[in-house]
Amino acid sequence: MRLYGYWRSSTSYRLRIALNLKQLAFENVPVDLLTAANRGADFTARNPFGSVPLLEAGDERFVQSMAIIEWLEEAYPEMPLLPDDVRQRYVARELAYAIATELHAPLNLPVLRYLKSEFGRTQDEIDTYYRHILARTLIPVERRLEELGTGDFLFDKPGLFETVLIPQLYNARRFAFDLSGHPRTVRIEAACLALPAFQAAHPDQQPDNPETTP
Ligand SMILES: N[C@@H](CCC(=O)N[C@@H](CS)C(=O)NCC(=O)O)C(=O)O
């Protein structure tokens, strides 16, 4: 498989985690979002949405990270990301999709750029907006984790929820979001970051990261 992604893209990070947890080997193909390589004709011919990640498996192409993860789960049922129990599967999806749709989507790079270029917002205002959107979803997620009485993971091992959560916490820390009121979320983050599947997927480990690559 070939994964077209960008080191700091949270949806690429999400998919790297999913592939690692499922022990599926892949080749990384960096797409530079800063130079808008994702909007060039070469890339949009492969993915009309112009976004990463894009996964190629044999002759087939897959786009939209949540749909890709759901496809992987069905095509490669070994090492499942969803629990067996139907109620637990629902909970994992409830929390994962809350983060993917209500938290990640309004914080995508083109949205932030648009706030600056079209509305003249300052970086401070954009950072405030970013933290506001994070709080809107991370606070109820923490409350749900409390209700569920979670420990190191949502259920017995990391799966769909952790796959989607961890990249957004990486962003939350970049934007100085205060996680002190989120002990259950932070416990899950620490347990995940101790695992090789998450470590190998981390932005710092990616070959196109200019901050860590000589
Ligand atoms: N719904 C899409 C969102 C993908 C997405 O937002 N990708 C971002 C990086 S995290 C991207 O490519 N941004 C650049 C752009 O859209 O121009 C998915 O889950 O795959």
Image (spheres, grey):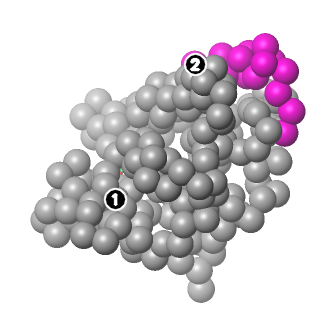
The quadrant of the image that shows the C terminus is bottom right
Q: Quadrant of residue 141?
A: top right
Please indicate whether residue 45 sits to the left or right of residue 18 in the image: left
Q: Quadrant of residue 79?
A: bottom right
Q: Nearer the viewer, residue 89 or 65?
A: 89
The quadrant of the image that shows the N terminus is bottom left
- Which residue appears at 31% of the width and 51% of the height? 63
Q: Which of the two marks, 2 or 1, is nearer to us in this view? A: 1
Please indicate whether residue 145 sits to the left or right of residue 3 in the image: right
Residue density around tag 2, few if under 14, some if 14–19, many if 20 or more, within 10 Å: few
- Which residue appears at 48% of the width and 34% of the height? 100
Residue density around tag 1, few if under 14, some if 14–19, many if 20 or more, within 10 Å: many
Magenta stretch encompasses residue 32: no
Q: Tell me where residue 87 appears, x and y as whole percent.
A: 63, 20
Identify residue type, mark 2. Answer: Arg
Q: Quadrant of residue 153?
A: top right
What separation in Å lies between label 2 and label 1 (alpha carbons)? 28 Å
The residue wearing badge 1 is 54
- In the structure shown, which secondary structural element does the residue marked by tag 2 occupy? helix
Q: In this picture, is 190 found above or below 194?
A: above
The region drawn magenta spans 135-152
Marks 2/1 in contact by CB < 8 Å: the verdict is: no
- Which residue appears at 76% of the width and 50% of the height? 192
> In the rendering, which numbered label is found on residue 136?
2
Identify residue type, mark 1. Answer: Leu
Magenta stretch encompasses residue 144: yes
Q: In this picture, is 50 found above or below 139?
A: below
Kindly tell me whether mark 2's CB lies below 8 Å from ligand 1: no
Q: Tell me where residue 182 appears, x and y as whole percent.
A: 79, 27
Q: In this picture, is 207 found above or below 100?
A: below
Which of marks 1 and 2 precedes in the sequence? 1
